Amino acid sequence: MTPGRQGVACTRSWAILVPISIVTAWARVQLVDEASFVDTLAPLASDAAVQDMIVDETMAAIAARVDFAALTSDVIDGVAGLIPQIDRVVILGTGENLALVRTGYAVATAVGYWLPLVSLGLFLLGVLIARRRSTALLGSGVPLLIGGGSLAIGIAIGAGLMGTVASQADLSPSALGVIYQQVSAGMAHTAAIIALLGAVIAVLAWTNGASRPAVAVRAGVESVNSGLRRSLAGCGVDTGRFGRWMSAQRGVVRAAIAALAIIWRLALRPLTAGEVFLVLIVALVAWWLSELVQVREDETTPIAVVEVVVEETAGQSAIRD
């Protein structure tokens, strides 16, 4: 298999793992990080719908254990032996499937940590070994958009199905909807951000491609930047050696701006759509300024020195009578 096809295969495999990576990473955080688990579920205790559901379930459990008719008929005999102790127990698992539960926990914690790293590694490998890196980036950004978007849409559809699930389980639809929203909000948010990043990567990759529209866009932007550089030079703005170095190393400068933008994005917690746009705008402004301060050899116009030579010719005039 050629390096180009290997790059396409890596980006496709990475795209398939995008929604799975989001889900497993979320599951690992909820299982391992106690603070995250508490932050996710603790707000449910103050929700009115959840409180009503707990009260209803508690009263239903008491009604199932207490014979109120017998209590009212035997009041004279005493009320105290007649009220049994109520103990509501939720069975999470039996001894037979304890080994399966432990195995599932171990797999979730391990996969939730390594799968996102494997996905990122496939992405980088696919881009590095691809014959056309702009095409590889485009082929990675689109699956990011599709993978993250499909997961976000799936979570939204699940929220709409909570009413049916609640009616089948004889639970409060509003309370179950609140619980579902609280539990899935983190995954939905991450999926939406991933989809947005995929769209940004796809657009940037397309503008650096070899298609006629992309070439026309680049030519238009370069024409504008070239005109601005000439105007600044005409106004006496000269960046000198720094500008010539920026021009010679513009590929390295662009890569450094992209790397810093990625590091900045990874440092933001929690990541929001506004912060993604902020990082993108700052990176674009930094790139644009780095283009304007460059001194391009093909744009330098030598100053023409015009020497005006005035010749004086001694004229003789003859005055004739």
Image (tube, rainbow, N blue to C red):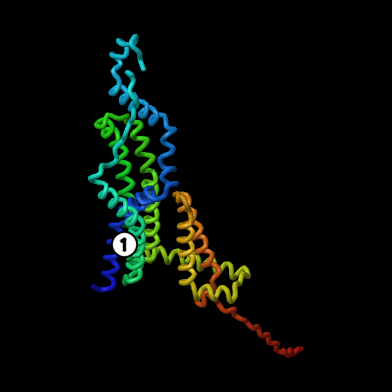
| Circle 1 crowding by C-alpha within 10 Å: few under 14, some 14–19, many from 20 | many
Q: Quadrant of residue 90?
A: top left
Q: Amino acid at mark 1?
A: Gly
Quadrant of the rendering where the C terminus is positioned:
bottom right
Image position, residue 191 (x, y; %): 36, 50
Task: Residue at 29% x, 50% y: name it.
Answer: 102
Image position, residue 286 (x, y; %): 52, 62
Number of numbered discs:
1
In front of the other: 94 or 32: 94
Task: Residue at 59% x, 75% y: name it.
Answer: 240
Image position, residue 71 (x, y; %): 31, 14
Which residue was labeled with disc 1?
A: 139
Quadrant of the rendering where the N terminus is positioned:
bottom left
Kind of element beneath mark 1: helix
Quick check: 241 left or right of 141? right
In the rendered image of this protein, does residue 287 appear above or below residue 68? Answer: below
